[in-house]
Image (tube, grey):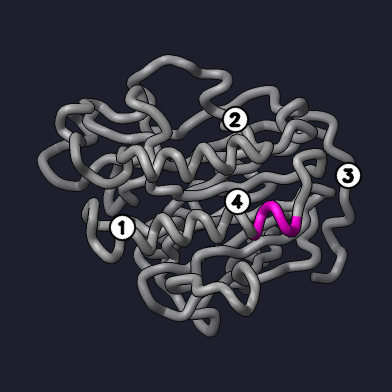
């Protein structure tokens, strides 16, 4: 079967639940990774998503973070975080097996300002993510790591390099941390199919940045080779940034072919 996976930083699920429900109704993703839900587990609308045909796992404490995975193709072996000994800096990682693919939804810290305490905590967090991936998975396993990485991988992933000079998201250490994941055995699904500039997943709310096309590509779907070989198409949905009360991010999608049919009714 073919399978559609998407990742989307919704910037508050409480504020954008109706938009998310509308989007999954027309896009029909089989798996949807969410970031920045800004919800606690106790109020996460699992029943609403269940009514829409999705099992879910959510990891959130009601603060500024929160991550989730929705799946209509099975959701097995759910796991929150990166292990008990790792400081998550909030709820930023959740994983589950969906139709034979291990899916990890991540929300990388922002970093705020180069040289600040938050910046170095971000770099440490990314090293922890790399260690977690390396300890629990193999480059030959079926793995997708999806989410808001708060890093633009290359200069072509920002609208103007001079505007971002000296800022977070584009600094050499941040990009080196991201490249560490790629060197381990992950591949940027979207960029391998679309090498051109001018393709973004985030725009600032201020200054009409979206309409001026002043954006960044910081939302990524990273895959191991076994999953990458099944990737037939990738897309970013700019329409999700239009209308009333949009997130400042848009969904990033990838279509996978020849995925074994899973038992969607299996218990998580």
Q: Nearer the viewer, residue 139 or 13?
A: 139
- Counting residues from the start of the chain, the first of labels 3 and 1 encountered is 1
* Mark 2 vs mark 4, CA separation in Å: 16 Å
Q: Main secondary structure of the magenta part?
A: helix
Q: Nearer the viewer, mark 1 or mark 2?
A: 1
Quadrant position of the C terminus in the picture: bottom right
Front residue of this view, candidates 93 and 173: 173
Marks 4/1: CA–CA distance? 28 Å
Please give the name of the residue rendered at 54% of the width and 28% of the height, measured from the top-left corner: 190
At label 4, counting other C-alpha atoms closer than 10 Å, the crowd grade (few under 14, some 14-19, many 20 or more) is: many
Q: Is residue 99 visible?
A: yes
Q: In the figure, residue 209 lies in which quadrant?
A: top left
Q: Which residues are magenta?
A: 132-136
Give whichever of discs 1 and 2 has the lower sequence position.
1
Q: Secondary structure at mark 4?
A: strand
Q: How far separated are the C-alphas under marks 3 and 1?
A: 42 Å
The residue located at (71%, 37%) in the rendering is 224
- Locate residue 43, reporting x and y percent: 50, 81
Q: Quadrant of residue 45?
A: bottom right
Label 3, on which residue?
261
Spatial CA distance of label 3 from label 4 is: 17 Å
The answer to whether marks 3 and 1 mark residues whose Cβ atoms lie closer than 8 Å is no
On the image, numbered disc 4 is attached to which residue? Answer: 32
Asked whether disc 4 touches disc 1, contact meaning CB atoms under 8 Å apart, the reply is no
Between 33 and 125, the one nearer to me in the picture: 125
Residue placed furthest toward the top: 196
Q: Residues within 10 Å of mark 2 (few under 14, many from 20)?
A: many
Q: Position of residue 184 (x, y in %)?
A: 65, 40
| Res. 189 mark | 2
Residue 82, by quadrant, is: bottom right
Q: Which mark is residue 252?
A: none
């Amino acid at each position: 079967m073919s399978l559609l996976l998407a990742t989307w930083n919704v910037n508050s699920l409480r504020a954008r639940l109706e938009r998310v429900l509308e989007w999954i109704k027309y896009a029909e993703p089989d798996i949807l990774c969410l970031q920045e839900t800004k919800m606690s587990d106790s109020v996460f609308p699992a029943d609403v998503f269940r009514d829409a045909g999705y099992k879910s796992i959510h990891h959130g404490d009601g603060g500024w973070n929160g991550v989730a995975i929705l799946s209509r193709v099975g959701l097995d072996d759910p796991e929150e975080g990166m292990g008990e000994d790792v400081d998550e800096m909030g709820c930023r990682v959740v994983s589950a097996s969906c139709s034979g693919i291990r899916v990890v939804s991540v929300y990388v810290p922002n970093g705020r300002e180069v040289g600040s305490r938050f910046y170095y905590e971000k770099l440490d967090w990314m090293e922890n993510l790399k260690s977690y991936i390396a300890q629990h998975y193999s480059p030959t396993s079926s793995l997708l790591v999806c989410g808001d990485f708060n890093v633009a991988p290359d200069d072509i992933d920002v609208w103007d390099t001079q505007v971002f000079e000296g800022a977070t998201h584009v600094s050499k250490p941040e990009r080196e941390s991201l490249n560490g994941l790629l060197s381990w055995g992950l591949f940027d699904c979207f960029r391998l199919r679309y090498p051109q500039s001018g393709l973004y997943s985030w725009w600032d709310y201020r200054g009409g940045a979206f309409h001026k096309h002043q954006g960044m590509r910081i939302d990524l779907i990273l895959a191991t080779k076994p999953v990458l070989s099944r990737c037939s198409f990738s897309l970013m949905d700019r329409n999700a940034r239009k209308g009333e009360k949009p997130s400042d991010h848009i969904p990033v999608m990838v279509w996978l072919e020849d995925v074994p049919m899973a038992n969607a009714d299996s218990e998580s």
